[in-house]
Image: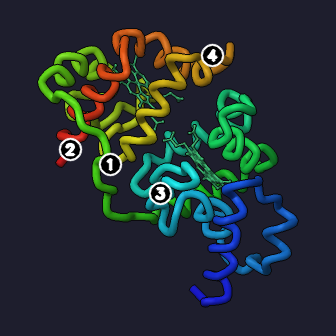
């Protein structure tokens, strides 16, 4: 990548901390020669989608294309990210709100070429207790956390644990999975009740961190 573009991306990443970057601003930075995924998504999800914990954009490298598509359509349909007091989700929603179907297909195809080393675990918990809690999750996410496309349940390994921690809390609070047309989110929301405390969430994520390696 040209250093000028790299500098522009750094500036955009900084801007994203405080405000949402509009399409016009991308044009102003002369990033038009780059693929949409590099131009827009990498700003908050890191180069090659390796994740950006400061902005809160999770790792997208190695994400299943069908799950990526589901989420982009879901954000666009306001299944996720409409609550203004949860800024990471709100910024993501605003970033895809005006994307066309063709643009979604373009980024899904491009991001499937992204690969990066998984980030280091950040959560500690009791993996024995986590394995007991995980029994109910395995029905949909698979014994090895590999996911199940037929059930629309994504793989849970090689994802940022800090991001999964947030998502489990969002499902619990109803910030995710409450929209009446969000059938997959609703199924997940109905399943998260077994995780009663933050410690339960830490324990199950500590166990998930042991899977898939
Ligand atoms: C302004 C910053 C920003 C931009 C630009 C952005 N995202 Fe995001 N994205 C986020 C944040 C923050 C989250 C986490 C939201 C949450 O915590 O619920 C997120 C979440 C996601 C998720 C959910 C991941 C999962 O495992 O459920 C997907 C998929 C995603 N983004 C894809 C994209 C794609 C593709 C693009 C480019 C078209 C993009 N994002 C552009 C900030 C951004
Ligand atoms: C009935 C099937 C089902 C069960 C049981 C289930 N899930 Fe899910 N889960 C899903 C589906 C479907 C999604 C995708 C929701 C969407 O598209 O927004 C999901 C999404 C998730 C996500 C969000 C992933 C991301 O990248 O944003 C996490 C984390 C998760 N599940 C963890 C768990 C854990 C932990 C358990 C056990 C306590 C569990 N799930 C039980 C079906 C299930």
User: For the point 34% across and 37% down, which residue is it?
Assistant: 156
Report the disc number at residue 51.
Answer: 3
On-image quarter of the N terminus: bottom right
Q: Earlier in the sequence, mark 1 or mark 3?
A: 3
Q: Residues within 10 Å of mark 4 (few under 14, many from 20)?
A: some
Within 8 Å of ligand 2, the CB of disc 4? no
> Which residue is denoted by mark 1 in the rendering?
158
Question: x, y (%) of residue 201?
Answer: 34, 24
Q: Please, is residue 38 above or below residue 112 in the view?
A: below
Within 8 Å of ligand 1, the CB of disc 3? no
Query: Do the numbered discs 1 and 3 sit on residues whose CB atoms are within 8 Å?
Result: no
Report the disc number at residue 212.
Answer: 2
Judge depth for marks 3 and 4 and give the one in front: 3
User: For the point 42% across and 33% down, which residue is it?
Assistant: 165
Q: Earlier in the sequence, mark 4 or mark 1?
A: 1
Question: x, y (%) of residue 52?
Answer: 50, 57
The picture quadrant for ligand 2 comes to: top left
> Which residue is denoted by mark 4 in the rendering?
178
Mark-to-mark CA distance, 2 and 3 = 19 Å
Mark-to-mark CA distance, 3 and 4 = 26 Å
Q: How is the model colour-coded?
A: rainbow
Q: Secondary structure at mark 4?
A: loop
Mark-to-mark CA distance, 2 and 1 = 8 Å
Q: Secondary structure at mark 2?
A: loop
Q: Earlier in the sequence, mark 2 or mark 3?
A: 3
Mark-to-mark CA distance, 4 and 2 = 30 Å
Q: Secondary structure at mark 3?
A: loop
Question: x, y (%) of residue 155?
Answer: 35, 38
Within 8 Å of ligand 2, the CB of disc 1? no
Mark-to-mark CA distance, 4 and 1 = 26 Å
Judge depth for marks 2 and 3 and give the one in front: 3
């Amino acid at each position: 990548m040209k250093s000028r573009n790299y500098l522009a991306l750094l500036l955009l990443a900084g801007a994203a901390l405080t405000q949402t970057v509009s399409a016009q601003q991308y044009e102003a930075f002369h990033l038009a020669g780059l693929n949409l995924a590099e131009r827009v998504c990498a700003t908050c999800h890191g180069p090659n989608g390796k994740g950006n914990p400061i902005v809160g954009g999770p790792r997208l490298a190695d994400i299943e294309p069908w799950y990526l598509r589901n989420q982009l359509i879901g954000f666009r349909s306001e299944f996720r990210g409409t609550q203004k007091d949860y800024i990471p989700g709100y910024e993501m929603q605003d970033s895809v709100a005006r994307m066309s179907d063709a643009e979604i297909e373009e980024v899904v195809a491009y991001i499937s070429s992204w690969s990066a080393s998984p980030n280091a675990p950040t959560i500690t918990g009791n993996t024995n207790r986590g394995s007991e809690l995980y029994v109910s999750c395995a029905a949909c996410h698979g014994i090895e956390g590999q996911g199940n496309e037929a059930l629309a349940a994504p793989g849970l390994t090689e994802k940022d644990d800090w991001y999964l921690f947030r998502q489990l809390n969002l499902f619990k609070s109803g910030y995710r999975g409450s929209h009446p047309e969000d059938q997959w989110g609703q199924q997940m929301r109905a399943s998260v009740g077994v995780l009663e405390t933050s410690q339960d969430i830490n324990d199950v994520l500590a166990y998930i961190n042991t899977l898939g390696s």
